[in-house]
Amino acid sequence: MPFQVFDYRKDITNMLVTPQIRSRFLKMEVGQFNQSHTHDLGHEIFLILQGQAEFDIEGHKEVVGPGQMCIALTDEAHTVRNVGDDEVIMYLSVTPHILPTHTSWTDEGEKQPPRFAKSSAYDQEQDLSVGADERADEHLQSVEDLVAQVEDAAETQREQVAAFKEALADGDKEAALKARDAMWDALYPMFERVYDMAGVWNTFTHRTVDEDF
């Protein structure tokens, strides 16, 4: 199956938007400034491809140029300003991408209410075919599915941790590693379910931003 190739000189868009990660090319005009914000869950990575961008992350400022990158970790306040004589083009990614992605703060350091965005804010088509009440039901079901998956995984962890310890005590490393692998076999679908829930949550919140929800 062919894959898509993106070019930062023309594809100024969100290229991948999933609960695991949102990635895009972003263009900033000369003098353009991004307001300070944090991310409740996500780390944000910035890679400069063109121009000169001044980043302020938690009060520390650096000018970042082509081929250089910087990272704003979860809960780290950050801003960026184009301080050069040319457009800035950067690649950025936020992971995970679970709404609301941007958190604003008052001058007194108080967290402002969450702000949700339409799917179009991330270059995705709006889906108005399903009502907000149905989306709410879908969200609730996804949470309940996750809870069931977690309970199953927890039971397996209890069994396999006991088997792991017993194998170690007996000096049976092969059995210990077999128990470890069984732990992962139960954890893997649980993580998948977490991302499934996040995707349904994002869809629900997108729907509640529409004027006629």
Image (cartoon, grey):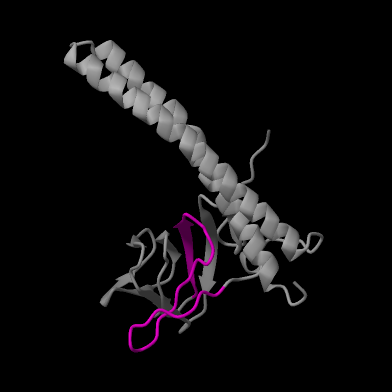
Residue furthest toward the bottom? 107
* Residue 38 in picture, x, y percent from top left: 40, 71
Q: Nearer the viewer, residue 45 or 193?
A: 193
Q: Nearer the viewer, residue 105 or 153?
A: 153
- Asked where in the image residue 167 lies, by quadrant, the reply is top left
Q: Horizontal placement of 8 versus 141: left or right?
A: left
**Residue bounds of the magenta highlight:** 87-115
Which residue appears at 39% of the width and 86% of the height? 106
Above or below — where is 41 with respect to 163?
Answer: below
- Asked where in the image residue 80 lies, by quadrant, the reply is bottom left
* Residue 85 in picture, x, y percent from top left: 43, 80
From the image, which quarter does the C terminus lie in? bottom right
Q: Is residue 193 magenta?
A: no
Q: Horizontal placement of 118 versus 66: left or right?
A: right
Secondary structure that dominates the magenta span: loop
Residue 33 visible in the current orientation:
yes
Residue furthest toward the right? 129
* Residue 69 in picture, x, y percent from top left: 35, 60
Which residue appears at 68% of the width and 69% of the height? 208
Q: Horizontal placement of 13 versus 181: left or right?
A: right
Above or below — where is 107 with respect to 199?
Answer: below
Q: Nearer the viewer, residue 83 or 171?
A: 171
